[in-house]
Structures are given as structure tokens and as C-alpha cells.
Image (cartoon, helix red, strand yellow):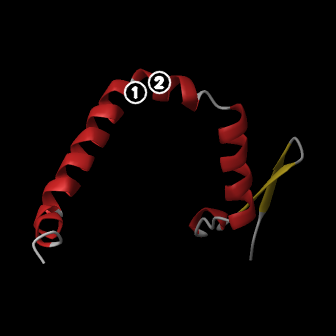
Amino acid sequence: MQSKIIFFENTFEAGSMNKTKTFHLAKLRQKFCRFIEYGDWEESLLKYEKYFNWFSYGLIAASALFFLPVYISIPAR
């Protein structure tokens, strides 16, 4: 037995709070596209540009050190 309470054309069914929330891929993609197009993520990203640059330089240096034995062994052949 389910009961309904109607408030201003919104219905609330008894037991609907126990339902698991499902994410629809189309709605999720639409929300992401709306965030990319209309959000202010670029301005907030520019605040951290210096840190991203230093992280990138560190990543490049770490990869160069990782592949250093390969760089040395190629001319030694």
C-alpha cells in the first residue's frame, strides 16, 4: 500500500526515499558540457597556473631521470 501526498503538483510517494539514486549518462554528460561552456573554471584554473607549471617541470625532470639509462646506452652501442 502506497500513499501519496500532493504539494503544489509535486508528488511524494511513501517509500521513495529508500530508492537508490541512479545517474543517467546522458544527464551527466549534459551537466558536464554545461559546466564547461558556462562555468568559471578557467578563471579559477589561472590562479593555480604557477603551481601547474612547476608540477609539469618536475614531471618532465622525473621522466628524464627515469629514462636516463636508456639515453646513455643508445650511443654506447
**Residue in front for this viewpoint, 24 or 45:** 45
From the top left corner, tell me how far across and down residue 2 is, in percent.
75, 71
Q: Which of the two residues, 59 or 69, is positioned nearer the viewer here? A: 69
**The residue under label 2 is which amino acid type?**
Leu
Q: Is residue 11 above or below residue 42?
A: below
Q: Which mark is residue 46?
A: 2
Image quadrant of residue 55?
top left
In the displayed structure image, the side of residue 25 where residue 60 appears, left or right = left
Label 2's element?
A: helix
Residue for point 47% across, 29% down: 45
**Residue 27 percent across, percent down from the top left:** 73, 58
- Write down the quadrant of residue 72 in the picture: bottom left
What residue is at 71 percent from the left and 47 percent from the top? 33
Tag 1 near tag 2, CB within 8 Å: yes
Q: Quadrant of the N terminus?
A: bottom right
Viewer-proximal residue, 31 or 63? 63
Report which residue position mark 1 lands on: 49
62 to 58, vertically: above or below: below
In the image, residue 37 lies at what x, y percent? 72, 37
